[in-house]
Image (cartoon, rainbow, N blue to C red):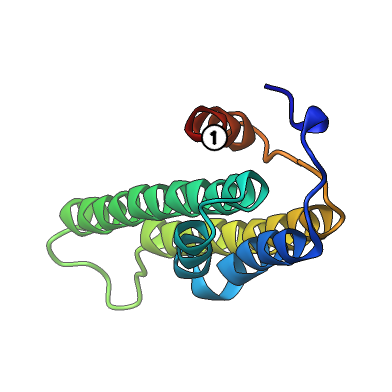
């Protein structure tokens, strides 16, 4: 089923789809989840809310992997330190790892902000815009339910 052949979304549907994308910026998965569950009868809203939910799931998995990697780096740094280190010696690997982890988290937050705004505007314009990689999965799930 091709989304371009469907009836255009109503103003309410476009607004709810916009909110699903924008609310993910401040409420993570909760806003899109509420919209997804409340407006299940609209394919347009369900599609956009599901994309936001899938993106939030990717973020959570990525953050979890990042946290595990950061903790491993901390323990490796501790284990590889000499028994009697110089008093002014700093664990360089720890600080580089902390900075790298922080940089990745900030990058993810900026990407979350950009995706929420860009796809929120597209949803408000009535477009069936798909997130890269996740949009196809969301469409497959939503079109099978419709």
Residue designated by label 1 = 146
Mark 1 burial class by Cα count in 10 Å: few <14, some 14-19, many 20+: few
Residue at image location 61% in from the left, 31% down from the top: 133
Query: Which quadrant is the N terminus positioned in?
Result: top right
The percent position of residue 32, horizontal first and vertical second, equals 53, 62
In the picture shown, does residue 4 fall above or below 101?
above
Q: Is residue 79 left or right of residue 140?
A: left
The percent position of residue 23, horizontal first and vertical second, equals 60, 71
In the picture shown, does residue 126 fall above or below 21?
above
The quarter of the picture where residue 146 lies is top right
Residue at image location 67% in from the left, 41% down from the top: 131
Q: Is residue 66 left or right of residue 41?
A: left
Q: Is residue 89 left or right of residue 111?
A: left
Residue at image location 61% in from the left, 63% down from the top: 20
Residue at image location 49% in from the left, 46% down from the top: 54
The percent position of residue 45, horizontal first and vertical second, equals 63, 53
Q: Is disc 1 placed on a helix, strand or loop?
A: loop
In the picture shown, does residue 40 fall above or below 87?
above
18 or 8, which lies in front? 8
């Amino acid at each position: 089923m091709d989304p371009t052949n469907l009836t255009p979304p109503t103003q309410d549907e476009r607004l709810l789809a916009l909110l699903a994308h924008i609310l993910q910026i401040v409420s993570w998965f909760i806003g899109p989840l509420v919209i997804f569950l409340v407006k299940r009868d609209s394919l347009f809203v369900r599609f956009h809310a599901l994309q936001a939910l899938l993106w939030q799931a990717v973020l959570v998995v990525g953050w979890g992997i990042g946290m595990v990697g950061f903790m491993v780096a901390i323990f490796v740094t501790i284990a590889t330190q000499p028994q009697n280190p110089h008093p002014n010696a700093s664990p360089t690997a720890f600080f580089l790892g902390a900075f790298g982890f922080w940089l990745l988290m900030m990058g993810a937050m900026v990407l979350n902000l950009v995706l929420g705004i860009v796809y929120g505007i597209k949803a408000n314009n009535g477009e069936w815009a798909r997130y890269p990689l996740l949009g196809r999965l969301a469409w497959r799930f939503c079109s099978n339910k419709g």
